[in-house]
Image (cartoon, rainbow, N blue to C red):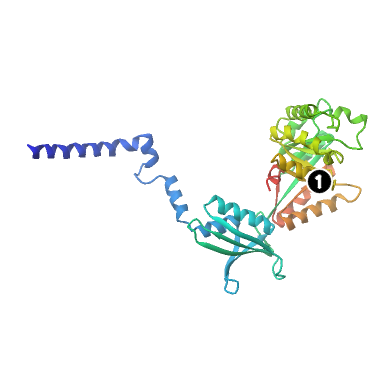
Amino acid sequence: MNKVKHILAIFIVLAILAAAAFFLPKTEFGARMLNTDGVASTAIADSAAQDTTPFVERFKENIQVLQASYSKRKKRDVWTLGKGRTIVYYLLQAQNFLQSNGGKVLRMEELHDDPTVFQSATLDALDPKGDSLHILLQVSENIFRDNASILSIAFQVTKLTPELIVALNALDFPYDLMVTPFGMGDGFLPDLDFVKNKELVLWILMESQSLDSRHKKLRPIRIHHTEQQIENIITEAKTLVPSAVGIATRFAEQAVEHKQLLQATFKPSKEQNLWFIDLSTNQKSKVDETCKEFSMRCKSITPYNPSNSTLDDYIGKRLRSAARSGMAAMVLPLSLESISKVKAMKSKAAHQGTSIVNLSTFMKY
């Protein structure tokens, strides 16, 4: 009797296994676990493939190492990196990769005592398994990395004619338009919809000796304004230009020295997810220190000034700055001439490995 029960139990188990083999691939869970051929899914296979890629090789790929060797004298792996990014940028990139992949930075130090190397630094770290990495990073003096540097182009808009719209739409790269949302005429904001490839920035007037009664309709932010008045200006500006991604100063050489005004400006700006660009060129600006209090993205950019430069000189200087430091931005008055100049500049940018990006991308670096 016991023998019969044992045989029946075996048949029941076999029946259950056969049913599972038939129905499991048809369930949602089974579909995720198996593909139609009954093998591991593509996602799992891809993950396994990534896991088998050596950590150091993924590290090299992430920071775009051009050449790797070992120095017996220095007892370090030597990684040569492409020109177009500063060594500080590469160190930050390396740190981010290590931290996000289970590694750990022990020490980073920029070097200044080797005249034979353009820029260099030492990096001591641990990989996810706890093995030590001793690396000498050095930037090549003549080989650019892919997309070696970035350059942003912004136009300050005081008028928008059909001719300007046509010229802007002929540009085949991203750019920013800095627009004042108040007092620009009924057709100004609707006309922006006809411009392609643009990113919009609120070009807000702020406290300056240059302000007078003519600017009242443009609603500048003044020192005597309350926090609520400043918040209203920024909130209404964002309502009028809902796709705006940041704020750039117009005039503002006095405003950027006034910390309370900046605090009252940054609070609603942060709430509206707007970054902030200081175009005042005031060396006494408190934008950077105040910005840190709000954990915002802020930068200072020197706009074109016809009193001390020509358009060609300014554009050329910004292009060289991108190649040298890895990133740069230019701010130009919107005109047919300035559009023509930057259009002609594109080939030079491409030749030196500089990608043209919008200001939102620039602000992330």
Q: Is residue 50 visible?
A: yes
Crowdedness of circle 1 by 10 Å Cα count: few (<14), some, many (20+)?
some
Q: Residue lying at the far top in this picture: please name it.
A: 186
The quarter of the displayed image where residue 7 is located? top left
Q: What residue sits 44% from the left and 45% below the top?
A: 43
Q: Residue lying at the far bottom in this picture: please name it.
A: 73
Question: Horizontal and vertical percent for residue 283?
Answer: 84, 48
Q: What residue sits 89% from the left and 37% below the top?
A: 208
Q: Secondary structure at mark 1?
A: helix
Q: What residue sits 71% from the left and 39% below the top?
A: 294
Q: Is residue 154 visible?
A: no
* Residue receiving disc 1: 340
Front in this rendered view, residue 176 or 364: 364
Instruction: Quadrant for the N terminus, please.
Output: top left
Question: Horizontal and vertical percent for residue 335?
Answer: 84, 41
Q: Amino acid at mark 1?
A: Ser
> What is the count of numbered marks?
1
Question: Horizontal and vertical percent for residue 286?
Answer: 80, 43
Instruction: Check the image and report above or below for 216 versus 176.
Output: above
Question: Horizontal and vertical percent for residue 314?
Answer: 83, 51
Front in this rendered view, residue 289 or 139: 289
